[in-house]
Structures are given as C-alpha cells and as structure tokens.
C-alpha cells in the first residue's frame, strides 16, 4: 500500500504519532504455568491434570515448552503479591528466545484477581506474548477475544468470593462456639485424626513458654534477656523479636483473633488451655500498670543500683558508667547537667549493705515474731474474707430487690417511672458494692509453713544482695524499696522512700539498734523507753531472763540469755490487708525465684 501523498509529510514527521498494531511473537516457544493452592487439591485441578491439558494443546498446535512454572501452595487471590509472577516476568525479560504465549489449563490457575488479570494481559500484549486458556483458546490480540479473556478473570474472582462466603459461614459458626480454625502459635499443637475434631493442647515446649511468662510477669526481664535464658535452657530458634510477638499474642491468654468475627470485635474465647489470664496479658503489655524498668542484656552486676538510686538534689534517677577500660572502676552519677553528683560504686554498695543489715534482727526473737506474723496474717485474711462475704450477701439482697422493682414496672404501669428510678438506684448501689468487692484480696498462703522462710529471708537481706547476680540484686532492691533509694551527697547517706510493708512489719520488732550493750546485759529490771525507729512511736524495753527457743519451739536449757522483751504499742487496724497480702506473696515468690537460680 502506497503512502498518501498530500504534501503533509513534514507535519506528520514532527507533530503526529500513529499507534502501530501490536503483533504476537513469531515463535514456537511457550511457558507452561501450573498452580495449586493446596497440595491436596483434587477438584480437577491437580498438577498432573493441568500438565496433561497443556501438553495436549502444545501437541495440537506444534509448539514447544521452553519453561515450566509449577507452583504449589500459593493462593491466586494475592494477585501481584505472588512471588511466582515476579519470577515468570523476570524469566521472560532475560530469556534469549522470544516467547509465543503463556499457556494454562484454566484461567483461574493464573489468577482469581480480575484487575490483576486485566493488567497482566495488557503487559503480555506489549511484550508480544499471548495468553492461552487451553479450554477457550482466546486470542488476546483480538479486541473482542481479549475482552472475553479478561471477563474470565473477573468471573473467577466472583466465583472465589461466592465460595469464600459459603466456607466462611461454616467457619464463623464454629469460631463462635470457640473452635479456632487458624494455625496455632508456638507452645501449642493439634491432636486428633479428623481435621474438624482436632483439639488444641499444650506442646512439649510448654515448660519454656511458662518460664517465659514467669520471667516477664514476676521479674520484668527484657525480651533479649528472656531469649538468652531460654536458649541456655535448651529452647531452639528463639530471639527477642519472637518473644515480643508471643507476649503480644492474646492466644496465650485463651483468646484467638480473626477478622471475620465482626460482632465480637475480631476476638473470641477459645476452647483450649491458656498459659496466662487476661489480667496478666494486660500487665505484660503495659495496658494497666504502665512501663517498668526491665532487666536488659547490658546490665552490669557492678552497677545494680543504676536507675534505683535517686539524686537528692534534682530528684532524678542516677545512671552509671565505667571510668576506665583498663581498670575496673565504676561510678554512679546524676544525669542532670551541672548537678555534679558522682560517687564510686564501692562506696554506695557498702552503704547499701549497711542499710539492708539494719532490717535484720536477733534470731532469739524468732518465736515471738513468728507467732505475731501468723496471727496478724490470719486476722487480716479473716477480716478480708468476712468483708467479702458481707458484700456478696449485700449484693445478692439488692439484686433481689432490683428484680422485684423490674417486675413491678410491668405489673403497675401507673407507677412505672417510680420503679424505673428505684431499679436504676439499686443498680448503682450494686455497681458500687461490686467495685469494693473487687478491691478486697484474700490469700490461700500456708503462712505457718512459710513464716520460717520469711524470717530467715529477713536475716539474710544483705547477704543475699552481696552474693546474688544482677537478677537477684535487681529483684531484691525493688522488693525491699519499691520506690527506690535517695542518695544525699552532702551527708553521704541513703534514705529509702518506701519500705516493703512486710519488711516494715517485721522490722517493727527489731529494736536492737535502740539498745546498747549495757542495756542488753544490765541486771536491773527498770523500764526504759525508746523511740520506735521507723514511725517515731514509743516502745517499752524491759530486760528479763527467758529461755532461748529454737525455730521448733524446743527449750534450750543450757543457753539462758538475757534479752529484752519488746511491748509494741501497735494496732493491726492500721495495716492495709491488701498491702500485707500482696507484699507477703511477692516475698514468697522471690524466695522461690532464688531457688531457680541456686
């Protein structure tokens, strides 16, 4: 065909562009694409069936397979996010041979994403490559057949949506009953032959998982430190990132997540054993109590009081540093500019040891202190239980009144508004009583068996701190002095902000600092008043002869010593039952913690 000669060639050359018709590559080479979502797939789309269909088409049209892409376990819904698509197009660009077409046994083997299918067809046309569904054999270079092929992709997407909706209804129904259909995290496994009847139970790694939560809940270790401990214990392939994911996963608290649970906000209580409670999950993830300092990998046993010491000048936590690389010189310092508080770690540690030593008492007081500790605990616990019982009884009574008011609303329409107000008033009272009930704590601690451990622990505070590693020191410091220690550089003294209630309670019996050697050994039986060391209350001291008792209360006839009898002007009503029980539980937990690291 001759070009039209109308004198406008110059204009066409500089100002006009004409779309040249795209043609398919003149080649015999094709790419075979085989895909299944699941290796067990058996709905006439098995790899063997797909391969047979493609080979049949190739033989009929005199073509040759240059490359076969066989993909197992990849969903077609992901479209452009599939790795196999990137691999295929990379191969096409690098291939020395021109590709005639991509051949599949069915359009939905290529994709179930209509938009991605449309985009892919246009991309193949630009490269001169065709797309062949072995059943339909559309020529995508023909506009009408191209439109039909793209419609096939959208039909496959719609079919997938319909199938998913049908499957989801069954799955959602089972999830609403507490059955988790998703993969279970580390620490769990499924048992049973039938897929739907498989139960979720704790796996062989359960002791590692339990220890992970214990280290986080009780001792507030950092994720890096927890991972190190678990690896030393024998847990394989675990790191700090994995620990973080596990701690954030609500599955361990008994709840599983799924976006399809719209009415339940994406979460449901599961039918499987849980490692922690929902309250502990909140505590771990700092939803209720806020962040606390954790034990980190780089924490040094030479600076255990870092962030625990508080500068008296600026009221900010003190940091620590190593002064020399050659010599082992460590210092605590205040981080505030211009504060100037800087002290050698050995000096602070000596003062801290002396401070802890003050809370030790004469073992000869053990029988008397032991008896008073047991009595106080039982009295407070009994009082709390009695209070709980009274509140529950009151709530039950008011609930009955509320139900009566609710019935009368329907029974007497004229007085409906009065009964409604009464019902609301009673409900408010119930809520108030329930709030009080939730704040009262009771304990099942066997105090008679634990009291000896507590007294022994009190007399070894400074020894435990000196001999312990960083973990022991860190926990002990926050146990004895929860809010830290104030360091005054001028007087070179340490002053606790707050003392553990149980240690304070036991320390009330130790008045040895108020007694000189003379008063301990004096034979006169006169009364002497001294000040109560911690609160300023007065204590009466009276020297007298008693028989020394051991822990079991047996008489030691040979050892008769003169020790002071202490009459404390002390009222148990001043003690908070919750604080007493909580601190007692913390100390017992710490004693158990020390056994783990012995």
Image: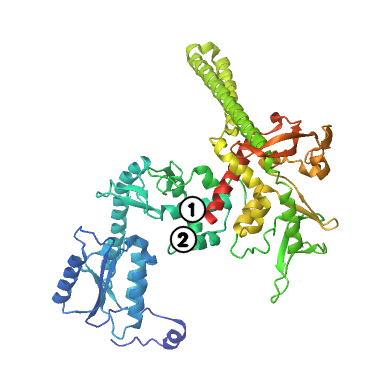
Q: Considering the numbered disc 1 on the image, is that residue within a helix, a strand or a loop?
A: helix
Q: Considering the numbered disc 2 on the image, is that residue within a helix, a strand or a loop?
A: helix
Q: Nearer the viewer, residue 219 or 96?
A: 219
Q: Pinpoint residue 519: horizontal percent, then vertical percent.
A: 82, 40
Q: Nearer the viewer, residue 286 or 548?
A: 548
Asked if residue 316 shows in the view, the reply is no
Q: Decide: is 226 above or below 59.
A: above
**Left or right: 213, with 479 as reference point:** left
Q: Residue under label 2, please give it.
A: 233
Q: Quadrant of residue 397?
A: top right
Q: Residue under label 1, please give it.
A: 211
Q: CA distance from mark 2 to mark 1?
A: 10 Å
Q: Decide: is 445 above or below 341.
A: above
Which of the image's four quarters has the N terminus? bottom left
Q: Residue furthest right?
A: 490
Q: Pinpoint residue 108: horizontal percent, then vertical percent.
A: 27, 62
Q: Nearer the viewer, residue 254 or 34?
A: 254
Q: Residue furthest front?
A: 558
Q: Pinpoint residue 532: horizontal percent, then vertical percent.
A: 79, 38
Say which mark, if any, is on residue 54. none
**Left or right: 250, with 512 as reference point:** left
Asked if residue 595 shows in the view, the reply is yes
Give the mark nearest the N terminus, 2 or 1: 1
Q: Pinpoint residue 162: horizontal percent, then vertical percent.
A: 30, 50
- Please give the name of the residue rendered at 62% of the width and 45% of the height, measured from the top-left corner: 456
Circle 1 Cα neighbour tier, 10 Å, few/some/many (<14 / 14–19 / ≥20): some
Which of the image's four quarters has the C terminus? bottom right
- Please give the name of the residue rendered at 73% of the width and 55% of the height, measured from the top-left corner: 352
Between marks 2 and 1 in the image, the one whose residue lies nearer the viewer: 2
Marks 2 and 1 in Cβ contact (< 8 Å): yes
Q: Quadrant of residue 17?
A: bottom left
Q: How many marks?
A: 2
């Amino acid at each position: 065909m001759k070009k039209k000669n109308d004198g406008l060639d110059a204009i066409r050359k500089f100002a006009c562009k004409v779309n040249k018709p795209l043609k398919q590559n003149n080649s015999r080479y094709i790419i075979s694409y085989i895909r299944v979502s699941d290796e067990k797939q058996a709905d006439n789309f098995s790899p063997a069936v797909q391969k047979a269909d493609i080979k049949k088409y190739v033989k009929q049209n005199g073509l040759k397979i240059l490359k076969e892409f066989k993909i197992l376990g990849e969903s077609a819904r992901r479209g452009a996010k599939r790795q196999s698509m990137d691999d295929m197009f990379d191969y096409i660009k690098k291939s020395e041979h021109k590709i005639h077409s991509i051949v599949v046994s069915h359009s939905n083997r290529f994709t179930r994403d209509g938009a991605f299918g449309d985009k892919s067809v246009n991309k193949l046309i630009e490269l001169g490559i065709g797309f062949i569904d072995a059943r339909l054999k559309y020529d995508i270079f023909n506009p009408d057949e191209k439109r039909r092929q793209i419609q096939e992709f959208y039909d496959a997407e719609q079919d997938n949506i319909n199938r998913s909706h049908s499957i989801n209804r069954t799955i959602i129904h089972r999830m609403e009953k507490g059955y988790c259909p998703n993969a279970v995290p580390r620490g769990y496994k499924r048992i049973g032959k039938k897929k739907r009847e498989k139960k979720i139970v704790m796996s062989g790694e359960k002791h590692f998982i339990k220890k992970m939560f214990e280290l986080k809940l009780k001792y507030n270790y950092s994720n890096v430190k927890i991972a190190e401990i678990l690896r030393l214990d024998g847990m394989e392939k675990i790191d700090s990132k994995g620990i973080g994911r596990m701690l954030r996963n609500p599955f361990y608290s008994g709840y599983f997540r799924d976006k399809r649970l719209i009415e339940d906000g994406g979460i449901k209580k599961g039918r499987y054993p849980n490692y922690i409670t929902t309250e502990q999950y909140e505590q771990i993830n700092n939803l209720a109590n806020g962040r606390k300092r954790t034990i980190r990998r780089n924490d040094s046993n030479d600076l255990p009081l870092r962030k625990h010491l508080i500068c008296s000048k600026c009221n900010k936590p003190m940091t620590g540093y190593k002064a020399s690389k050659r010599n082992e010189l460590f210092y605590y310092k205040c981080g505030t500019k211009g504060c100037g508080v800087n002290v050698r770690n050995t000096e602070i540690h000596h003062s801290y040891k002396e401070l802890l030593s003050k809370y030790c008492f004469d073992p000869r007081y053990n029988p008397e202190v032991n008896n008073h500790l047991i009595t106080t605990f039982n009295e407070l616990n009994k009082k709390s239980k009695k209070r709980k019982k009274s509140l529950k009884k009151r709530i039950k009574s008011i609930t009955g009144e509320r139900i009566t008011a609710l019935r009368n609303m329907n029974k007497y329409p004229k007085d409906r508004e009065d009964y409604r107000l009464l019902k609301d008033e009673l409900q408010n009272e119930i809520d108030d009583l329930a709030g009080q009930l939730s704040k009262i704590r009771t304990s099942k601690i066997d105090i008679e068996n634990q009291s000896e451990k507590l007294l022994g622990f009190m007399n070894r505070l400074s020894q435990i701190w000196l001999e312990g590693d960083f973990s022991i020191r860190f926990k002990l410091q926050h146990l004895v002095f929860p809010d830290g220690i104030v360091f005054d550089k001028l007087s070179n003294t340490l002053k606790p902000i707050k003392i553990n209630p149980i240690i304070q309670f036991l320390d009330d019996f130790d008045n040895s600092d108020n007694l000189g050697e003379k008063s301990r050994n004096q034979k006169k039986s006169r009364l002497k008043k001294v000040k109560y060391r911690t609160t300023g209350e007065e204590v009466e001291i009276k020297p007298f002869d008693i028989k020394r008792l051991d822990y079991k209360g047996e008489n030691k006839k040979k050892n008769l010593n003169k020790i002071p009898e202490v009459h404390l002007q002390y009222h148990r009503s001043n003690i908070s039952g919750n604080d007493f029980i909580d601190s007692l539980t913390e100390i017992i937990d710490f004693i158990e913690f020390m056994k783990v690291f012995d």
